Amino acid sequence: MSTQLGRIERDSLVLLETLSLFVRYQLTVTAPLPEGDKAAQAIGRERFRRFVDQVGRQLATGRSIGAAASDEVGQ
């Protein structure tokens, strides 16, 4: 059981580090929105809402995108 918990901890750390590096990269290469650009801000809010909805739907299915991607790589 301790081996399995060790793997879970390692996998969680790898996942968190990967996500952190991706977010840092995105924030580095994406230009900030101008303060008065209400249309761009609205688009950003809508994209974020869709992202959160998609994450919720994916979690509700019980199957992760990461598991599906690793299945594809293993084939």
Image (spheres, rainbow, N blue to C red):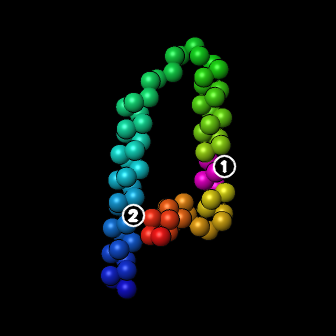
Question: Residue at position x 50%, y 65% from top?
Answer: 72
Query: Which segment is the magenta one?
Result: 52-56
Q: What residue type is labelled 2?
A: Ser
The quadrant of the rendering that contains the N terminus is bottom left
Name the kind of residue labelled 1 in the image.
Answer: Asp
Q: Does the magenta stretch include residue 53?
A: yes
Circle 2 sits on which residue? 12
What SS does tag 1 mark?
Answer: helix
8 vs 2: above or below:
above
Say which label, 1 or 2, has the lower sequence index: 2
Q: In this view, does 22 lie to the left or right of 66?
A: left
Neighbours of disc 2 within 10 Å: few (<14), some (14-19), many (20+): few
Q: How crowded is mark 1: few (under 14 residues within 10 Å), some or many (20 or more)?
A: few
> Of the numbered discs in the image, which one, if any, rests on residue 75?
none
State whether the magenta stretch is mostly helix, strand or loop.
helix
Left or right: 60 in relation to 71: right
Residue 53 image position (x, y, % from top left): 66, 49
Q: Mark 1 points at which residue?
A: 53
Instruction: Choose between 40 and 35: the one closer to the eye.
Output: 40
Q: Where is residue 40 in the image (x, y as percent from the top left)?
A: 60, 22
